[in-house]
Image (cartoon, rainbow, N blue to C red):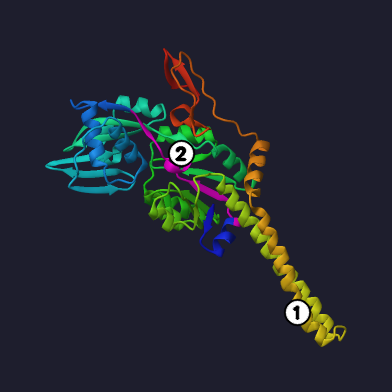
Amino acid sequence: GMLIKGGKYIEALAQADVVLVDKTGTLTVGRPAVTAIIPLGGMSDVEILALAAAAERDSEHPLAAAIRQAAQDRELHLQVPESFMAVPGHGIRAQIGTDTIVVGNQRMVGKDAVHPESDRLEAAGNTVVAVALNGAVVGLIALADTVRPEIADAFAALRAQGIDTIEMLTGDNEPVAAALARQLGIGYRANLLPEDKIAVVRTYQADGHRVVMIGDGVNDAPALAQAHVGIAMGVAGTEVALEAAHVALMRDDWMLVPAVLAVAKRTMRVVKGNIAFTAIYNLVGLTLAALGVLPPVFAAAAQSLPDLGIMANSARLLRLQGMPRAAALTASSAIGAKPPAVVCADSCCVPTTVDSGATMIPLQTIIDLGCSDGCCAPADG
């Protein structure tokens, strides 16, 4: 379930002490859904959705896919853009006829994207993008993703393996990033552009840390390449990220992250054991041969014996199949990782949904929620 592109990355993984992770598509499943459409300029929510979906037609971003899916669910007719430009960390710009459509964050659209409704949606854990038509903001689209259910176990296993620092790097807004980071018990940096992520990686490297970067999208590719080891989520990852990364996870399973570290650490122990065994064996053999204790014929025959020992010792790595996952789950159980708690009343929040038999926690509900007047709001503290 994992592809490591070179032996030097196994050595770097074994020495890693900092793990940096992207949010959308990495910590979350990468399948966000549209939760609200807020008209601002006299257009209907259907018109805003159709406009945004048409503009996002050629985008690879998970949020763009969610907008297109929402339009498809409503069976909306979408125009084909004549030109399209993606601005990593900001949004997209498209030309449809004589109209210029911009879909993105506040940095992309401008201060007109700031709205009280936007603040409320972000406080509830939604990512909000603005839709602008010919320079005027005409609406807001709120989207929410689902946190991967195995994240808590994976982080517990990483800490059990000696990873001291786990930090989330995201281009998302501060409220959403803070809520998710607080729930997972990790540090975070929000509102980051791709070059900002590279700067964070370089800062840790300059301080002498061995950095692992985990991501899946175009925005992550530069940081994946800069890190000592870049890990791409294989199934959900884009081709750019898979090419830039040094390790590709072929399954969309976060438990492969502590597993690949376990493989690297045990591999390096076996390598060092083989080197030590060979050195001691040769030293003893050469000494005995030089003193005449070991006849030349026997010395020549004995020279091939270490190869058998090295092969036998290395064969122990074959027993790694299935072991890292079990060890990771044991570690997380010992640490006592707990699922997120949701406090709701009057059925104003849906705490969980079920997907393929696994419990999935919606992003907007992983915040420690309280309810006021029948509506969910962030709890005090």
* Magenta-tinted stretch: 14-35
Q: Which mark is residue 303?
A: 1
Q: Quadrant of residue 125?
A: top left
- Please tell me whether residue 249 is drawn above or below residue 35 in the rendered image: below
Label 1 crowd bin: few (<14), some (14–19), many (20+), radius 10 Å: few
Q: Nearer the viewer, mark 2 or mark 1?
A: 1
Instruction: Please state which of residues 212 and 338 is positioned toward the viewer in this rendering.
Output: 338
Q: Which mark is residue 28?
A: 2
Residue 303, image x, y percentages? 75, 79
Magenta-drawn stretch contains 107: no
Q: How many marks?
A: 2
In whole angstroms, how far apart are the C-alphas of marks 2 and 1? 54 Å
Q: Quadrant of residue 312?
A: bottom right
Q: Residue at x 61, y 34 (%)?
A: 337
Residue 64, image x, y percentages? 32, 40
Q: Is residue 104 left or right of residue 281?
A: left
Instruction: Please state which of residues 1 and 220 is positioned toward the viewer in this rendering.
Output: 1
Magenta-drawn stretch contains 19: yes
Q: Is residue 175 left or right of residue 316?
A: left
Residue 244, image x, y percentages? 42, 57
Instruction: Please state which of residues 206 and 110 is positioned toward the viewer in this rendering.
Output: 110
In the rendered image, is residue 131 in sight? Answer: yes
Label 2 crowd bin: few (<14), some (14–19), many (20+), radius 10 Å: many
In the rendered image, is residue 112 in sight? Answer: no
Q: Quadrant of residue 297?
A: bottom right
Which residue appears farthest toward the left when viewing the image? 98
Hey, what amino acid is under mark 2? Answer: Thr
Query: Quick check: marks 2 and 1 in contact, CB under 8 Å?
Result: no
Hey, what amino acid is under mark 1? Answer: Gln
Residue 264, image x, y percentages? 61, 57
Q: Residue at x 64, y 59 (%)?
A: 267
